Image (cartoon, grey):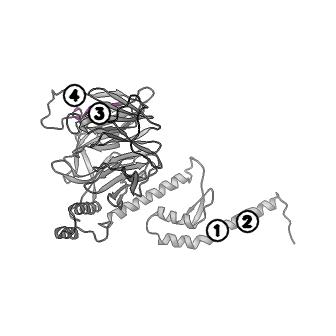
């Protein structure tokens, strides 16, 4: 007997439900064999298997496919009290599994990222004269970077507010890599900043000395900072504070000796001067090391650039079409390079006289695809390293106004993340928004090593790093310093493996 289903009736809806259910299980059966083989062949992590499955299993709107259980689960919208399965939670779980697997792989990784690279072979080639000295040094550093081992650093001489108990915002090393300028996040919206002495990194248990007996506290965010050479190399710290409705922003020039006695021959009677100027919306700052523009610094503001002299109080203003997020002075010429929110990079020639904020012309000008986050001028000032918020890191030739190298793998979408260039070692370093520290060969843009964060990846706990081959001054300790959460780690060279 043939049944006729009336459109919209119970029988019709029951028939539709059975058809949907059968087709869903048919899809599962169709891809079950491929899913099980993919998950069995994958030996990395849940994240890698998840990415493999997503390419072979069809994506159903509102459902999530679990490769381990080989079935679909419904995604619940928003944040619920019953702990729903959301895309954010799934991505966080996959990222954590990926990080843990990378930590395990990092312990068992190969000691060289380049085939046939070993210390004895490099030394033999250098002795025979077939390998230039500069290339030999770069290859040795490349080999040593592959052998770095992580150690936790202990902080001694804590101050009364509890050193080592607050989250690190960022760290900044001076030119000799003997001191760190440290910014910590304190409770109730406050932050403090002070100095750390690195002379104890050579010990079996690496230690640094905290010089925060008189730390600076502020309820404003420290946007950026740089070391300044006023009466001696790295004698001061230039700090930019973000403005608030109840407190305008400012740029402060603080003597390093204000934090504590760092030198044995320090004279307590010596006068200390703090230069402070109110500036709203300061996004970047840079100190000029050219003696022809002594005691001067630049600040990148909203749609303008300020160049100020701390001795004469002479101030120059340059109007721009976008906010200036990154700056650096040239040392051989009177040029100031600026990176904007619009992605433009341009130079200002400070030798050219002008009479008004709009009566000036740009020098070199080019653009990248997103907002500029960092500028690094090389010793050969014809080359400039530029990074932006799309994750691109490029080396530009300023004579041809053309990028010549692209350092791939960096991840960034909106954060203001720095790039570190070590020309003597032939290395370029950057921490991505995924909390991975990546090290490239500076000459050929080869990715040498990817270091996962020791802690769970989060946008609130992006590590801050400093690299040097002579940490600590008198007793140099090469390696990488990493500050994440309230911990400080030292990735030191392992001489036994080199």
Quarter of the image holding residue 28?
bottom right
Location of mark 3 (residue) = 296
Q: Please state which of residues 180 and 60 is positioned toward the viewer in this rendering.
A: 180
- Label 2 Cα neighbours within 10 Å, binned few <14 / some 14-19 / many ≥20: few
Where does residue 362 sit, x and y in percent of width and height? Answer: 41, 40
Tell me: residue 29, above or below residue 300.
below
4 vs 3, front mark: 3
Give the magenta range: 251-264
State the CA–CA distance, disc 4 to disc 3: 18 Å
Location of mark 2 (residue) = 19
Which quarter shows the N terminus?
Answer: bottom right
4 vs 2, front mark: 4
State the CA–CA distance, disc 4 to disc 1: 75 Å
Location of mark 1 (residue) = 27
- Label 1 Cα neighbours within 10 Å, binned few <14 / some 14-19 / many ≥20: few
Where does residue 293 sit, x and y in percent of width and height? Answer: 27, 35
**Is 282 displayed left or right of 297 in the figure?**
right
Q: Indicate which disc, 4 or 3, sits on the residue closer to the N terminus.
A: 4
**Is 309 displayed left or right of 433 in the figure?**
left
4 vs 1, front mark: 4
Q: Indicate which disc, 1 or 2, sits on the residue closer to the N terminus.
A: 2
State the CA–CA distance, disc 3 to disc 1: 68 Å
**Cβ atoms at labels 4 and 2 below 8 Å apart:** no
Location of mark 4 (residue) = 272
Judged from the image, the secondary structure of the residue bearing numbered disc 2 is: helix
Q: Please state which of residues 460 and 275 is positioned toward the viewer in this rendering.
A: 275
State the CA–CA distance, disc 1 to disc 2: 12 Å
């Amino acid at each position: 007997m043939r049944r006729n289903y009336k459109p919209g009736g119970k029988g019709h809806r029951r028939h539709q439900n059975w058809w949907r259910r059968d087709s869903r299980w048919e899809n599962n059966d169709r891809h079950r064999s491929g899913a099980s083989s993919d998950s069995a062949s994958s030996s990395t992590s849940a994240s890698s298997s998840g990415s493999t499955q997503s390419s072979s299993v069809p994506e159903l709107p509102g459902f999530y496919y679990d490769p381990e259980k080989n079935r679909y689960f419904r995604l619940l919208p928003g944040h619920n009290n019953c702990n729903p399965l959301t895309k954010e939670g799934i991505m966080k779980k996959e990222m954590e599994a990926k990080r843990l697997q990378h930590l395990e792989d990092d312990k068992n990784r190969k000691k060289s990222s380049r085939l046939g690279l070993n210390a004895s072979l490099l030394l033999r080639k250098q002795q025979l004269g077939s390998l230039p000295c500069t290339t030999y040094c770069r290859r040795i550093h490349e080999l040593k970077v592959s052998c770095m081992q992580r150690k936790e650093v202990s902080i001694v001489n804590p101050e009364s507010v509890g050193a080592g108990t607050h989250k690190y915002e960022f760290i900044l090393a001076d030119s000799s890599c003997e001191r760190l300028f440290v910014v910590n996040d304190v409770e109730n919206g406050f932050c403090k900043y002070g100095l750390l002495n690195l002379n104890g990194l050579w010990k079996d248990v690496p230690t640094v000395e905290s010089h925060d007996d008189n730390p600076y506290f502020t309820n404003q965010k420290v946007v950026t900072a740089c070391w300044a050479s006023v009466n001696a190399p790295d004698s001061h710290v230039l700090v930019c504070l973000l403005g608030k409705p109840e407190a305008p922003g400012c740029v402060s020039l603080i003597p390093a000796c204000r934090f504590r006695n760092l030198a044995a021959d320090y004279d307590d009677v010596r006068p200390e001067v703090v230069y402070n100027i109110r500036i709203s919306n300061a996004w970047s700052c840079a100190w000029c090391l050219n003696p022809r523009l002594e005691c001067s610094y630049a600040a990148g503001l909203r749609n303008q650039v300020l160049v100020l002299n701390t001795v004469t109080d002479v101030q120059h203003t340059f109007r721009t079409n976008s906010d200036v997020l990154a700056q650096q002075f040239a040392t051989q010429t009177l040029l100031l390079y600026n990176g904007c929110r619009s992605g433009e990079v341009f130079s200002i020639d400070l030798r050219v006289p002008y009479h008004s904020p709009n009566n000036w012309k740009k020098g070199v000008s080019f653009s990248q695809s997103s907002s500029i986050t960092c500028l690094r001028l090389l010793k050969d000032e014809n080359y400039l390293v530029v990074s932006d918020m799309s994750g691109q890191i490029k080396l530009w030739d300023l004579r041809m106004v053309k990028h010549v190298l692209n350092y791939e793998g960096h991840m960034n979408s909106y954060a203001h993340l720095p790039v570190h260039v070590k020309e003597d070692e032939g290395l370029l370093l950057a921490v991505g928004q995924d909390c991975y520290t990546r090290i490239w060969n500076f000459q050929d843009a080869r990715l040498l090593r990817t270091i996962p964060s020791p802690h769970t990846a989060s946008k609130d706990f992006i590590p801050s790093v400093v690299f040097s081959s002579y940490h600590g001054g008198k007793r140099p300790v090469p390696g990488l310093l990493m500050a994440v959460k309230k911990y400080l780690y030292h990735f030191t060279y392992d001489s036994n493996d080199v």
